[in-house]
Structures are given as structure tokens and as C-alpha cells.
């Protein structure tokens, strides 16, 4: 399988007067269609790494290629388009728009793409909500849903544009263990059915156990990197 | 663009209290602006109407006081070419004495051709009793004069010229020109009657009086006319030159009214800008999410421009309604004893529309700052800070 | 001699949770000396377990069944200890001890338990600590038992990064230590880049690897 993501000597320094080097010359390749876990203590730089991969943050030096395109050469508008069409984000704090319903939140990336919502698309959004078990509450405002429901909505939203890549930062970080299991099973199903590439940061052993590759970040460096054969 | 508008609308709906408050702010600001504007405009137009509505704007007469204008036809033919002219009346005005029994009073006899003069002085409306002079010897007198001499319609009085000869006049009507000095001294007659008293020949009159379309251009028109007539012994006098004080009063009023309106609009703009700036902060989380999902900077800033526009439109509509309401209640409840409004208010649709447009564009403009601010917001700030 | 038919019979007994039948099956193989104890472990017990509920398979049977079956196997392992002792008596003893354990939160210790018997049969003194051993306990065991070999079994590949961390830690804690480190287990054999990242002295896959190790050490 080809590489979907390639990082070449990626470093990140925060601050100008007091400089903190958060990432040290990271080299990393992520295969298309793989299911990857990133672990590491808090402050290890794993979230920064994920945000840099997702083009939400820029590296201080080094090259990132997504789909063989160097993202640091892209303009803001092109990056926005890349995020919209190629990447789906799931964050620890679900980050829904509380002013919109679950269904509207799921459709939001598609709206942003500038497409008209036809019957087919509406059905797809409803299917995704069914997949995450939220058919009943799809017309509730996101602000009025429980944490688990919001997180599952965020997952459905990440999927609407059929992204090649899903980046998740502690997607089950604030969910109870039962919901964690559900969310995880869901991600796995999506991986199986849509061949989506996943990069998931997790503290949760049960989730990390089930990924195909575990990358441990320590002090801004890749400390270990094991894959299932 | 459409999505930005939708999001803007939803943001506004989701914080109803805040939206209502800002709408109220815009609406009150605009209604005050409309109210003050209409009030001042009404005040000025009624004042102007009182001053120049029923009086000549430009008068042509001889340079020398009490000298006649010779050959008025040529002058009239010249001035009539001016497109600004709406009314023109030639008259003979002369001093004389009214003698009733032993009492003699100095008066001013003004002889008009009433079909012309009515266009300027609206004598028909000023007549409180009787009718305008029809016959050569018919006269009408002021109400005060009639009271002081105990005269009534049908009485015959002696009018004595400065040269001493006496002509009899029949009183056919009483007028009230709302100015005591005039009511006490003017005697209006036919032009032939006053010619007899003044001893003017057939091709002599004392003045030509005119009204023009734009009273405020009267001074300029007067200068133009005197150039056209081009006679040394003739002078043109306009109302503006004779009413400098009134004019500067009106000017001051306009300026202060404009200032008030400008400051009201500025405070509305500041209010919108500050509320929207806070709203960018409040919605920075949502903006971060939208940006992470791939909304571009232009779309993000359109959200806030749309908010400004929506607030502006609704605020303007409400403001106009409030403003009209204020005007209505003012004209309904603040009345003179005779039932007329204390201040006659002028409802000028153009002005009200303009106020609405100003409100809309001001609030859209006010949203420019938050819109630019939203452009700079990075999704990282939101994601990092949870 | 290994017979496929005979093996399938045993596997069926396991699948149907017939503990007694499974045990008697193994006992008869040992009593009749059809197979050695090593062959029983490698060709019957380990093989059947991985076939029924292997780590490489999607979860086909419920976890409780998996646990039930592995507990039957565990019982068999314990019950075959007399045969282990017989086998041990046949080999030359080596004056070396080995501590066998699984890392914290690693509960799959049956493989490690079998490895203990392999080491005993090979002539080592084997201390089996078992599942879920926190790092501090490992340190303490190393200090008290002073083994020549620390043998760690890793079944779940998630624990590879923990192993990586532990070995780094041990090198810091016991600089220039005399004991060797041996690793094995499903995760060690079925993950990429293990040998390049894990600083172990030996990678053990089979009983043969243990006898080879004995040759090297003696």
C-alpha cells in the first residue's frame, strides 16, 4: 500500500523568547488504509503531531506530504479544501456546533464543500447517524445532547465527505467505558467498510490494543513504533 | 456565501436575548434619528412657509425710495424668461391718510392686480370677511384698522393722498395677514385706485414682486435678474438678504440636527461593532470547528458581515416603525389648543428611506472589524484551549 | 507419533468444554509415551488454543468461552507436572535460574506458564511469577532472585511499547547487569521492527530455542 502521509524531519518549536521544542525531527510514514494508534504521556507532543498532520498547525521545519502533496506549500484556501475533503477530525471534546441539530452538524462539512443537499445526501447523513446509533435524536440541537451522543455525532460528521483520513485525538477521552467500546467498534467498522486511514491518539489501553500499529511519542520523538504483521 | 448567511442567522437566533438587545439598540437609534430629522425638517418648513410662503421672494423696484419704475412691461418681459419664476405681480404702493370724521391715520395703500397677487399673497385665504376689490374704488382693510376706526363692510371712507386730494373708497372686505403692523396700516385696492393716489402715469408702477421655485436660490436669481434687466436705476431685493438672522437661525438648526443624527448613527455603529466583536469571541469555538472542517477565511468573515447586514436590515425596519410611531404619537398628543400639532412634522419618505439605508450600511460596516478578526482566528487556538 | 485425527478429537473435547475427556486424552498420550511432554505442549495445547481463539483471528467465540477453554488447558498443564519432573530427570541440570513473567496488565500468562516447564525440562531453575507484574515488582524480583535470565512473555502487541520502556528502564536501574533478557510470545513473533527496537538478548520461539540457549550459556 502507498503512503498516505509522509513526515520528513518535522520539528515544532513554540514560543519566541522561551523556545520549547515540542517535536524533534520526526520521520513518519502512514500507509493508506492502516489503523494507527499514537500513545504517549501528556505533553509528549502527540497532539501537536496530529494537528500538524491535519494541517491545523504548521511545523517549524520539515516537510509533510499528504497524498504526495507537500502541505506547507499550500495556501490557506487550498488547505481548507484539503481539510474539508480529505480529512475528518474527531476530537476529545466533540466540538459540535451547538446551534445546529445533529443532522445539520453531520452535513456541515458537505455544506462547506459548497454542495446542495439532495435527497441522496440527506439519506447518507441519516445512514451515518444510524451507524452511530443516533437516529432518534438526529433532529435535536447538538447543545442538548449527551457527551457520548455528541461524540458519536462528531464521528458521523467526520465521515460525511468520505475522507481518506480520519484523525482522532482521544476520541473516547471523556466517555464512559461502555460508550468507549461502542465508539471504538464503530471506528473499526468504518475502517473495515470504507478502508479509511485512521490515526488515533489514545490513552485507552483497550483501544490502543486493537490498532494495527502503535506509535509511542516521548519527549517529542518517536520512542517506539510497532505494527501487527 | 449562502452557508455563511445561514450560519449567521442561526448564530443570531441561538442567542436571542443578545440579538434582541442589539436590534433594540439599532432600532431606537434609528428611530431617534428619524424623529429628530423629521421634527427639524417640519419645524423649518413651517417656519419658512410662514416667512416666505405668502410673501415675495424677490422684489424689483427703483433704487431711489418712493420713485416709480418706468416702463414695467419691458422689465416684466425680461424677467418672465427666467424658468425659476412661479408667480409675478406688479403693484403700486404709496403712503396716504385715512380720514374718518376728524381722525386721520397714516396708511399704506397697495394696489394689486389680484389674479396675479393672489399667487403670492394668497389674499383669498387671508380675507376674514367680504370680498376682494372688484371695482376701481373697492378697498379692503386690515382687521386692526377696522377695529380702531370701527369700520365695517359697506362703509365709505376718505383716502387722502400726500398731495392732498381725496378719493373715496368702498370697504368690501377685511383681511388678517397675521402681522399687527400690516393689519393696522395696509389698505389694499385695485392698481388703478392706488395709481390715482400716487399720481403715477399709466406706464409707471412701484414694484414687481416675484416667487421662485427654489426660495433658497432667491439671492442668486436676484443677481441674475438685475444683470438681465441691466438698468442702473433699478434694484432687486431678495428675501434672504432681508432675513439674514432668520437664515442663520435655520442654518444653525440644520447643522445641530445633522450633528445629532450623525452622533446617533455613530453610536449605533459602535454598539453593533462592539457587540459583534464580542460575538466573535463567543463564537470563536464554533469558528475554530468550522475552520477545522474546512471553512475558508472568506466564508468565515462573511458570517459576521451577514450578521451585521441582518441586524442592520431588521434594525432599520424596526427603527423606521418606531420612528413613525413616535412621529404619530407626537402629532396626535402634543397639540395646540386649536387641535393643530405643536410642531408640524414633515414625513419625508426619502429621508426615512435614507435613514434605513444608513442603518443597514452602518451595521454592515460595523461588522467589518469582527469579520476581519475572524479571518485571523486559527483553529488551533480553539482546539488547544478546549 | 503425532496423528491429526487424534489431535482433532482432543480439540473437539476442548471446544465442547469436556475437561475430563481432554485431560484423560492427554494423560493417555503421555502414559503410552505416544508423545513427549514437549510435543504435547507445542502440538496439542498451544496449537489447539491458538486455533480456537488465536490472536490473529477475529473474535469468533465469546470471551467467556475462550477463558473457559484456556482454564481447562491450564488445569491440564498443572496436572502434567509429574511428567515434567520425569523429563527433567533425564536432562543435565544447569546451575542457572530464570524468572518468567508477563508485564503489567498482560493477563495472557498460559504461554509463560508452559515456558516455565520448558525451562525446567531443559535443566534450568525456573521461577514463574505470572501475569500482570508491575515494573516495581519486577525490579524487586530481580534483586531477590538474582536470576541469570529474565524471560518476558508478551501476547498483546500493545505491551511491546511497555516492554521497550521497561528494558530501557532496567538498563538504567541495573547498569552493566549480568542477567540476560529473553523475550517471547505471540506479539514478539507477529510484529514488525521488534528486534530493531527491543533491546533483548534472546528471542525465544520454541523449546529448541531454549535448549540452544542452554548450550550457549553452559
Image (tube, grey):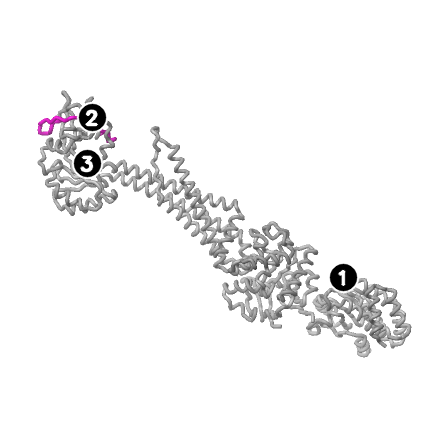
Q: Earlier in the sequence, mark 3 or mark 2?
A: 3
Where residue A208 appears, as percent x and y from the top left, is 68, 63
Where residue A135 appears, as percent x and y from the top left, is 63, 54
Q: Quadrant of the N terminus of chain A?
A: bottom right
Label 2 and label 1: CA atoms lie apart by 122 Å
Label 2 CA crowd tier, 10 Å (few <14, some 14–19, many 20+): many
Residue nearer the viewer, C195 or B37: B37
Residue receiving disc 3: B115
Kindly indicate whether the residue at mark 1 contacts the one at mark 2 (C-beta within 8 angstroms). Answer: no
Q: Is residue B161 above or below residue B73?
A: above
Q: Is residue B190 above or below residue B75?
A: above
Kindly indicate whether the residue at mark 3 contacts the one at mark 1 (C-beta within 8 angstroms). Answer: no
Mark sitting on residue C62: 1
Find out whether residue A1 is within the magenta segment. Answer: no
Kindly indicate whether the residue at mark 2 contacts the one at mark 3 (C-beta within 8 angstroms). Answer: no
Q: Quadrant of residue A70 in the image?
A: bottom right
Element at badge 3?
helix
Query: Which label lies toward us, 1 or 3?
Result: 3
Residue receiving disc 2: B145
Q: In the rendered structure, the residue with mark 2 lies on which chain?
A: B
Element at badge 1?
loop
- Name the residue located 10 percent from the left edge and 38 percent from the top edge: B203
Q: In the rendered structure, the residue with mark 1 lies on which chain?
A: C
Camera sees residue C51: yes
Camera sees residue C169: no
Label 1 and label 3: CA atoms lie apart by 114 Å
Horizontal side of residue A80 vs A167, given as left or right? left
Amino acid at each position: 500500500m502507498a503512503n498516505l502521509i509522509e513526515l520528513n524531519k518535522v520539528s515544532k518549536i513554540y514560543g519566541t523568547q522561551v523556545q520549547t521544542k515540542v517535536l524533534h525531527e520526526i520521520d513518519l510514514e502512514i500507509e493508506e488504509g492502516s489503523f494507527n494508534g499514537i500513545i504517549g504521556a501528556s505533553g509528549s507532543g502527540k497532539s501537536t503531531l496530529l494537528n500538524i498532520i491535519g494541517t491545523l498547525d504548521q511545523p517549524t521545519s520539515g516537510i509533510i506530504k499528504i497524498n504526495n502533496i507537500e502541505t506547507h506549500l499550500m495556501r490557506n484556501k487550498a488547505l481548507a479544501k484539503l481539510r474539508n475533503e480529505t480529512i475528518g477530525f474527531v476530537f476529545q471534546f466533540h466540538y459540535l456546533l451547538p446551534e445546529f441539530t445533529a443532522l445539520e452538524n453531520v452535513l456541515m462539512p458537505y455544506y462547506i464543500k459548497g454542495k446542495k443537499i439532495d435527497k441522496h445526501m440527506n439519506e447518507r447523513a441519516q445512514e451515518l447517524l444510524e451507524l452511530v446509533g443516533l437516529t432518534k435524536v438526529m433532529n435535536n440541537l447538538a447543545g442538548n445532547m449527551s457527551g457520548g451522543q455528541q461524540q458519536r455525532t462528531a464521528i458521523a460528521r467526520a465521515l460525511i465527505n468520505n475522507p481518506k483520513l480520519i484523525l482522532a485525538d482521544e476520541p473516547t477521552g471523556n466517555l464512559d467505558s461502555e460508550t468507549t467500546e461502542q465508539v471504538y467498534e464503530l471506528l473499526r467498522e468504518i475502517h473495515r467498510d470504507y478502508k479509511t486511514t485512521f490515526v488515533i491518539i489514545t490513552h485507552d489501553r483497550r483501544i490502543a490494543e486493537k490498532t494495527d500499529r502503535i506509535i509511542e511519542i516521548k519527549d517529542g520523538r518517536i520512542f517506539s513504533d510497532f505494527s501487527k504483521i | 456565501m449562502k452557508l455563511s448567511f445561514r450560519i449567521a442567522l442561526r448564530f443570531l437566533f441561538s442567542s436571542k436575548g443578545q440579538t434582541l438587545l442589539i436590534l433594540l439598540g439599532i432600532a431606537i437609534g434609528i428611530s431617534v434619528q428619524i424623529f429628530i430629522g423629521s421634527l427639524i425638517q417640519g419645524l423649518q418648513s413651517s417656519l419658512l412657509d410662514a416667512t416666505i410662503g405668502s410673501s415675495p421672494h424677490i422684489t424689483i423696484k427703483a433704487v431711489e425710495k418712493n420713485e416709480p419704475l418706468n416702463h414695467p412691461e419691458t422689465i416684466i418681459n425680461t424677467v418672465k424668461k427666467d424658468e425659476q419664476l412661479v408667480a409675478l405681480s406688479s403693484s403700486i404702493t404709496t403712503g396716504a391718510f385715512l380720514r374718518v370724521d376728524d381722525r386721520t391715520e397714516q396708511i399704506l395703500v397697495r394696489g394689486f392686480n389680484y389674479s396675479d397677487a393672489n399667487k403670492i399673497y394668497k389674499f383669498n385665504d387671508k380675507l376674514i370677511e367680504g370680498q376682494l376689490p372688484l371695482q376701481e374704488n373697492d378697498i379692503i382693510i386690515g382687521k386692526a384698522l377696522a377695529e380702531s376706526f370701527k369700520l365695517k363692510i359697506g362703509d365709505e371712507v376718505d383716502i387722502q393722498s400726500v398731495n392732498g386730494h381725496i378719493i373715496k373708497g368702498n370697504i368690501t372686505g377685511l383681511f388678517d395677514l397675521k402681522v399687527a403692523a400690516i393689519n393696522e396700516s395696509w389698505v389694499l385696492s385695485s392698481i388703478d385706485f392706488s395709481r390715482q393716489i400716487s399720481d403715477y402715469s399709466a406706464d409707471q408702477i412701484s414694484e414687481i414682486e416675484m416667487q421662485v421655485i427654489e426660495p433658497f436660490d432667491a439671492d442668486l436669481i436676484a443677481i441674475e435678474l438685475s444683470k438681465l434687466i441691466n438698468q442702473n436705476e433699478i434694484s432687486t431685493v431678495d428675501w434672504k438678504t432681508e432675513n439674514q438672522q432668520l437664515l442663520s437661525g435655520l442654518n444653525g438648526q440644520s447643522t445641530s440636527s445633522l450633528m445629532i443624527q450623525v452622533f446617533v448613527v455613530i453610536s449605533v455603529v459602535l454598539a453593533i461593532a462592539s457587540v459583534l466583536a464580542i460575538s466573535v469571541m463567543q463564537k470563536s469555538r464554533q469558528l475554530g470547528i468550522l475552520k477545522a472542517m474546512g471553512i475558508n477565511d472568506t466564508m468565515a468573515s462573511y458570517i459576521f458581515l451577514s450578521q451585521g447586514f441582518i441586524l442592520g436590515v431588521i434594525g432599520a425596519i424596526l427603527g423606521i416603525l418606531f420612528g413613525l410611531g413616535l412621529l404619530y404619537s407626537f402629532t396626535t398628543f402634543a397639540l395646540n389648543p386649536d387641535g393643530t400639532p405643536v410642531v408640524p412634522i414633515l414625513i419625508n419618505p426619502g429621508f426615512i428611506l435614507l435613514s434605513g439605508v444608513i442603518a443597514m450600511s452602518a451595521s454592515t460596516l460595523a461588522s467589518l472589524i469582527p469579520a476581519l478578526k475572524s479571518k485571523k482566528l486559527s483553529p488551533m487556538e480553539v482546539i488547544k484551549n478546549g | 507419533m503425532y496423528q491429526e485425527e487424534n489431535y482433532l478429537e482432543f480439540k473437539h473435547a476442548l471446544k465442547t468444554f469436556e475437561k475430563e475427556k481432554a485431560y484423560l486424552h492427554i494423560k493417555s498420550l503421555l502414559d503410552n509415551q505416544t508423545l513427549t511432554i514437549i510435543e504435547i505442549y507445542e502440538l496439542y495445547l498451544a496449537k489447539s488454543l491458538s486455533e480456537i481463539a488465536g490472536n490473529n483471528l477475529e473474535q469468533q467465540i465469546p470471551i467467556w468461552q475462550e477463558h473457559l477453554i484456556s482454564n481447562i488447558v491450564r488445569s491440564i498443564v498443572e496436572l502434567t507436572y509429574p511428567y515434567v519432573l520425569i523429563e527433567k530427570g533425564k536432562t543435565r541440570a544447569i546451575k542457572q535460574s530464570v524468572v518468567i513473567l508477563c508485564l503489567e496488565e498482560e493477563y495472557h500468562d498460559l504461554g509463560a506458564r508452559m515456558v516455565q516447564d520448558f525451562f525446567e525440562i531443559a535443566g534450568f531453575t525456573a521461577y514463574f511469577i505470572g501475569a500482570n507484574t508491575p515494573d516495581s515488582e519486577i525490579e524487586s524480583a530481580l534483586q531477590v532472585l538474582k536470576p541469570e535470565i529474565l524471560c518476558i512473555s508478551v501476547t498483546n502487541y500493545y505491551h511491546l511499547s511497555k516492554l521497550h520502556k521497561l528494558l530501557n528502564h532496567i538498563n538504567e536501574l541495573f547498569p552493566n547487569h549480568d542477567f540476560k533478557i529473553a523475550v517471547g510470545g505471540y506479539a514478539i513473533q507477529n510484529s514488525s521492527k521488534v528486534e530493531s527496537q527491543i533491546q533483548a538478548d534472546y528471542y525465544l520461539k520454541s523449546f529448541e530455542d531454549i535448549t540452544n540457549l542452554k548450550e550457549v550459556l553452559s
